[in-house]
Image (cartoon, grey):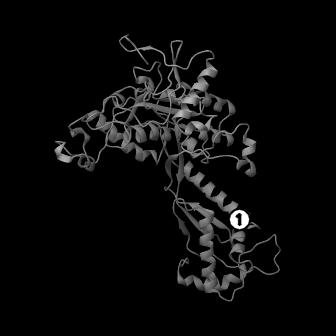
Amino acid sequence: MMFFRSATTLAFFAAAVTHFVNADSESEEEKTLCFDYSKMEPISLDRGECTVRKFNKYTKDMFQEMKDLYPDQKCKGGVKNERMAMTGTTSEEDAEKVVEAMCRDQLAAAARDLPRINDWDIEDVDLQDFYDGIGFLNNETGNFKQEEQKFYDRGGYDKYNVISEDPRLNDHYPTTQRSYDAGMAVAAFYEESTRHYFGAPTNKLGEGCGSFTAMCCWHRDRQYFDQNGNCGPTDCANQEPGDNTDLCWTEDDGEVYPWPGSSTEGDLHCHGISWGEDDDSGYDINTMAKWNSLFYVSMYDHMYKRGYVGSITGDRNIAGSQPMCGCVEEMAPVARADCEQVTGSAEYTLAVGEDGMLVIEKVDDTFELEFESCEGYEFLDDFEPEDYQNDIEKEELKTSNNDLAGFVFKQYLEGKISKDQTDKVAETLIGYRNPDVNKNDKKREEACEEAFLEKFPGRLYEERLVSDIVGNSISA
């Protein structure tokens, strides 16, 4: 591997190398470079490559190249010494910490440079209606996208008159032009969501959530052929999303309605986000991109890709009224929810300056936001933020990924949200302090009942009768 700008620089190195010799008389506190690396071509680091491992690899390659050029040069401490010298440290551990800090700072600098879009441009969509769980995107049935192969997998032209990637042409549940246009707009806006920070989609959400946590819960699947939910090409009426939670109870007009079992609630799906105090430091990308995360969860990943729509209380058999997506404190108690977080990545260059010090720099206009399942921890009683600072005590924690409660607990331990805010979350995510809800439906049911009896002592955790939209009494 050749790092030099050109072969003509070799003469320069022959003259300069003696200045960087790591003399045997050097004290343990001081490290000087054995070779001059400053005229080497900067090394390009791709996304995810600004790491200690890559630093160690490239400095090993650089050192070996110089050794090959100057075989008679003696270098006390070898490449380990070079790493300490170019980071201004006296131990390998400290050198690694410097590299990690430089990568972190450059990522933050790249994150700060990302532009912002305040108004969401989604074709003909009233965003407040959408997040309330009403409007045509929530009420209509039909695909936003599809592949021709899905038709052939299910009988081809023996079963379908039209086989096309255009969902407006389907035999059953053809997509309206309005839904199709909105779906195309969502797909296009997803590209913007990776290259811009978004403002709040509605004034209501823009007012903020006291819990710093928001959640969507769906009761309906409107799209087939996507391998999510129960909607099928010939039976998509009132079909359900993939089940990942239990509805514990709802409240309506002073009355409480428990929902044990699944006879009424059916399959429900909840997915949320959480963030910290707003700032523009660049270090908390998840907070800076919280509304991007909500867009991804609500409109792109769940509606456009899976077809999940409609508020839980949009089901006429479930009492109460809540938005499809809103602050967690607005939502009825559920056992658990999945979770999304936002990270970022950029490209970098690595070089050694004329002063012999390591230089890591972001490459302009390469930063992108990335959406991924949350990484958190199972709740551990009496484990506090100060315990989290202790690496030994931190080993007591168990990971809890793709779990909103686990991510909220991690946010608390990192000092991004307060104890009062976690208490607000725990009122809705009743499994916050009971990670067993992630194991199976039985554990969720037990947790719901326990929380209900604690809040409403003396009442039975049994389904109640509710009235349907025409006033007839039905069994819930």
Amino acid type of the residue tagged 1 in the rendering: Ala
Q: Is residue 288 above or below residue 47?
A: above
Q: Nearer the viewer, residue 37 or 448?
A: 448
In which quarter of the view is residue 432 placed?
top right
Q: Is residue 124 above or below residue 13?
A: above
Task: Give me the residue at 47% from left, 20% from top.
Answer: 321
Q: Is residue 29 above or below residue 323?
A: below
Task: Give me the residue at 51% from left, 53% from top.
Answer: 367
Asked if one can make out residue 260 in the rendered structure from this viewpoint, the answer is yes
- Where is residue 275? Give x, y as percent: 59, 38
Query: Which residue is denoted by mark 1 in the rendering?
Result: 95
Asked whether, in this view, residue 35 is left or right of residue 91, the answer is left
Asked whether, in this view, residue 293 is left or right of residue 300, the answer is right
- Where is residue 141? Give x, y as percent: 30, 32
Q: Nearer the viewer, residue 446 or 143?
A: 446
On-image quarter of the C terminus: top left
Task: Give me the residue at 51% from left, 35% from top.
Answer: 441
- Where is residue 191? Give x, y as percent: 41, 47
In which quarter of the view is residue 417 placed?
top right
Asked if one can make out residue 208 in the rendered structure from this viewpoint, the answer is no
Q: Nearer the viewer, residue 338 or 75?
A: 338
Asked which secondary structure carries label 1, the reply is helix
In which quarter of the view is residue 235 placed?
top left
> Farthest residue in the bottom direction?
72
Q: How many marks?
A: 1
